Every structure is written in C-alpha cells, then in structure tokens.
Image: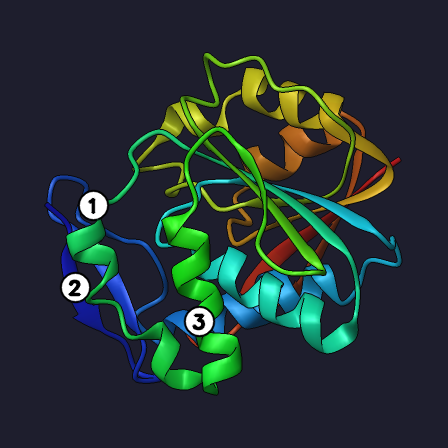
Amino acid sequence: MPEIILTEDGSHTLFVPELNEHYHSVHGAIQESEYIFIKCGLNFSKADPIRIFEVGFGTGLNAFLTAIDASSQNRKIIYTSIEKYPLPDSLINELNYKSFFPRESAYIFDLIHRGKWNIVQEISNNFTLNKIEGDFIKQEIRGDYDLIFFDAFGPEKQPEMWSDEVFRKIAEITVPNGILLTYSVKGEVKRKLRKYGFKVNRLPGPPGKHQIIRAVKI
C-alpha cells in the first residue's frame, strides 16, 4: 500500500515502497503539477474545447487542477485518463489537496473520485471525465487528443511505460500541433518522441527539477 508523504509545499504525495518512488515531487506535489501540466501544458494550448489524454491517473491531482482551471477560464475540457492500479477510497480520502482551494472548487475533487470508472461523466459545465481502468500497454486507445499528460513512473522504475510501442500509440492519438508534457528529459525519451513525429523542447522545470519536456506533434 502506498504511504502518504508531506511535500515541501504542504501538499501530499504517495510513496511506493516496492518501487522506491513517489507519485509527485517531494519539493511540492501541487506546485509540480500546476507548473508542468497546467502552466506549461493546458495554458499553452490554444485548443478550445480541448481534449486531454492522461497516462497515469494516480491520485487524480492533475484532473482536479485541470477541472479547476476549466471553470476559472470558462474553457470546455474533455479529459480521459487511464490507470492500471486505481487507489482505494480510504487512501484518496486522506489526501489534503482540497484544503488548498475554496469550497466551491474543492468539491470537484470528490466528484472526480466518486465517478465510476469506464464511463464518461460530466463533472461540471466545463469538465467531462472518462477514467479508464486498464493497462495502457495492452489496451486499445482511440480518439484524437490535443494535449497529452504523460505522467507514468520514471523510465528507470517502469521502463515498459517508456517503450517505442507506448510512444507510437501516443503519437497515433495526438493531433497535428498537439502537445505532450512529461517530466522526464532522458535522451531515450527525446529520441523516441522525435522518432514518432514530435518536435521536442526542453523547458525549465519546477523546484527540484532542472528541466521538463514539452513536445509538439509535427
């Protein structure tokens, strides 16, 4: 069972002893997600409505922050996320993400997690969610997406999620000029993204991370 850890910005992350890996940066879970996926991804994309595919639903933090941004920007978002190992409600209920936001935004976190898996649901007027319980490697993924949140565990911990086949599948569902965000800047990741038609840009990272990748589908 993952363990709840307090990060430097006061928000929780989870630590997985078997992998010796955290779900988010220990320098700040919310801080990291807001910077990489919201500021450098969602706010950079011009698509509206915007179709997002997330690899690794995890704690639902990225979906939660995206839904909040959708409401504040009055922008329609269709959000699809896949997770092989959904977390139990008992663990989700202990996470403190809601305490960082006013009540009118915080309740969205509960709506996201109460929603059933494998069913498209309208969480708010601006945010539609489809949580897929499944293995991205084995599952057939269809659709056209403007923005990819690639948030799997790192290549050294979960190498199968950073394979040629995974990036080929990602490329197939990403529209021209679509954007992919990931925290890994390893050479093998950049090479595979370029191989499957992405222009790779390195951006300054959040605290504790030197750089991140924002790649655009050519």
Q: State which mark lies toward you, 1 or 2.
A: 1
Instruction: Assess whether mark 3 and mark 2 are in contact (beta carbons under 8 angstroms).
Output: no
Look at 72% across and 60% down and name the residue there. Answer: 126
- Cα–Cα span, label 1 and label 2: 13 Å
> In the rendered structure, which disc, 3 or 1, sits on the residue that comes first in sequence?
1
Q: Amino acid at mark 3?
A: Tyr
Location of mark 2 (residue): 4
Cα distance between the residues tagged 3 and 1: 18 Å
Query: What is the x, y in percent for residue 108?
Result: 49, 66
Q: Residue at x 61, y 19 (%)?
A: 141
- Assess whether mark 1 and mark 3 are in contact (beta carbons under 8 angstroms): no
Mark 3 residue crowding within 10 angstroms, few (<14) / some (14–19) / many (20+) = few
Which residue was labeled with disc 1? 88
Kind of residue indicated by mark 1 = Pro
In the rendered view, would you say 144 is above or below 77?
above
Residue in the foreground of this view, choosing between 202 and 80: 80
For residue 64, side relative to residue 67 (left or right): left
Q: Earlier in the sequence, mark 2 or mark 3?
A: 2
Secondary structure state at the residue bearing disc 1: loop
**Quarter location, residue 200:** top right
Residue identifier under label 3: 107
Image quadrant occupied by the C terminus = top right
Q: Which residue lies at the image location 45% right of the left edge and 84% below the top edge?
A: 103
